[in-house]
Amino acid sequence: MYSPYIPCRLKITPADTVANLKAVCEELKARSKRVFLCTLPTHGAKGAELDRLVATNELIVKSFSRKETIDGLVVIDEKNNGVFKRADLYCMDHHHFNSRGYRELAKAINPVFANDLLKVQFAYFRDLLEPSKSK
C-alpha cells in the first residue's frame, strides 16, 4: 500500500509523486491491467504536511483526469468520498484505515469497480460466443 506520508518525510514534491504514480500506472497498463488510482488521504495531516498532500491531490486529479493520460485509468478523489473524512475509520496513527475503514472504502468505491468488471465480463463472453468479432 502506498503511504501518503512517505513523500512528506522524504520531501518528494507533488510533481515527483505524480511522475512516480504515472510510471507505475503506465507499467500496469502495459501489462494489460486496469488501473484505479485513489488520491491521498489528508485526514490527520496538519500544516505543511496537509498543504503538500492537498497540492499533490490537486495535481493527481489534474494530471490523471485528462483524456490524453493513461487510457482507461480511473481516479477516485478523496474529496468526493465521505469515507476519507470519517475519523472513526482510521487507526490510532490517524493516517491509515482500520479494518472497518477498508470495508467502508470498498463499499463506497464498489460501483466504480463493478461497472468496470461488467465490461470485462461482457467482453469475455462476447469473445467466447463470437470469436470472429473480437479480432
Image (tube, helix red, strand yellow):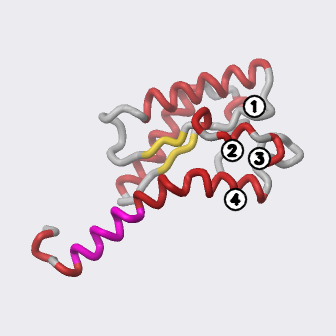
Q: Which residue is mark 1?
A: 9
Determine the main secondary structure of the stretch shown in magenta: helix
Q: Nearer the viewer, residue 77 or 51?
A: 77
Q: Are marks 3 and 2 in contact (CB under 8 Å)?
A: no
Residue 50 belongs to the span the image colors magenta: no
Q: Position of residue 84 (x, y in %)?
A: 69, 40
Residue behind mark 4: 103
Estimate the spatial distance between the alpha carbons at disc 3 and disc 2, rounded to whole Å: 12 Å
Q: Secondary structure at mark 4?
A: helix
- In this view, the residue in front, 115 or 21, is 115
Nearer the N terminus, badge 4 or badge 3?
3
**97 relative to 134 in the view: left or right:** right
> Quick check: marks 4 and 1 in contact, CB under 8 Å?
no
* Pointer 2 or 1: first along the chain: 1
Three-letter amino acid code at disc 4?
Answer: Arg
Instruction: Where is residue 25? Give x, y as percent.
Output: 45, 47
Residue 22: image x %, image y %? 45, 39
Give the residues in magenta.
117-127
Label whose residue precedes the other's in the sequence (2 or 4): 2
Q: Which mark is residue 96?
A: 3
Image-based side of 29 in relation to 134, left or right: right
Q: Are marks 2 and 4 in contact (CB under 8 Å)?
A: no
56 to 69, vertically: above or below: above
Give the Cα distance between marks 4 and 3: 13 Å
Q: Amino acid at mark 3?
A: His
Query: Closer to the camera: disc 4 or disc 3?
Result: 4
Report the residue marked by disc 2. Answer: 83
The numbered mark, 3 or 2, whose residue comes first in the sequence reads: 2
Q: Secondary structure at mark 1?
A: helix
- Mark 4: give few (<14), some (14-19) or many (20+) Cα within 10 Å: few
